[in-house]
Amino acid sequence: MSPRILLLSLLLCLLPVSAQAFDLGDLQQRLAATPSLAGSFEQQRYLADLDSTLDSRGRFRFVRGERVVWQLEAPVEERIELTPEAITSGSGDQAPPGGEQVAQLFLQLLEGDWQALESRFSITLSGEAAQWTVNLIPREAALRERIERIILNGGERYLQRLEMQTPTGDRLHVRLFDQHTLAPDA
């Protein structure tokens, strides 16, 4: 075999390895590199039973492992805070029973906490560091009754889109943008 063919063969063997080098662990490390984050969001909720779409927008503030504050600005103003223990609104009202599970799920999705999510979802990653997609399919029948799938899209440093689909046809699309890191004491 000529040296040229040998070199070319070696290079071709390395291509699939480098293409698969980006995995869920790498993605989790990238997301964890930003402990505090703020930005804007646009949210679109499609309600299949009513065949209508509800649009909202606002700002968010995320502190890894602690909370996310979702400040709706339009069409209404409302402050919602999610912690690992609960969901609360600006009026101090607490979510009904089970709200803490929704809050934990949302925080785990934002954090890319795949280890916590793997017990409830089958998780697949596609793409590369600059443009990735994570698909989560519920493992248990009880969860599949409420969630058909969750799709996360992002780039180098941040989660950029979250989509949730339900078996009833309802859909939630959230786009995160104008994101920036916050100082540790912010």
Image (cartoon, rainbow, N blue to C red):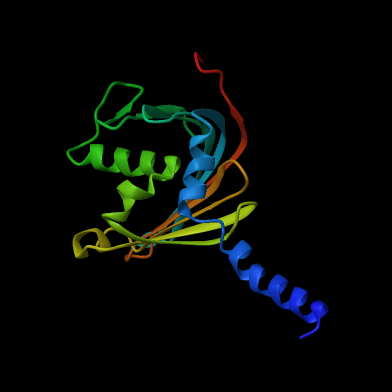
Residue extending farthest top: 185
- Residue 118: image location, x then y, percent: 31, 55
Residue shown at the point (27%, 58%) measured from the top left:
146
- Percent coordinates x, y for residue 64 in the rendering: 42, 30
Percent across and percent down for residue 100 are: 24, 37
158 relative to 150 in the view: left or right? right
In this view, the residue in front, 168 or 117, is: 117
Q: Residue furthest left?
A: 97
Left or right position of 180 against 99: right
Residue 54 appearing in the image: no
Residue 12: percent from left, percent from top: 69, 74
| 22 to 100, vertically: above or below | below
Q: How many marks?
A: 0
When asked about the image quadrant of residue 139, the answer is bottom left
Residue ranking furthest to the bottom: 1
Q: Which residue is at a point 65% across and 52% down the rendered structure image?
A: 130
* Nearer to us in this view, 52 or 1: 1
Determine whether, in the image, residue 121 is placed left or right of residue 59.
Answer: left
Identify the residue at image location x=65%, y=73%.
13
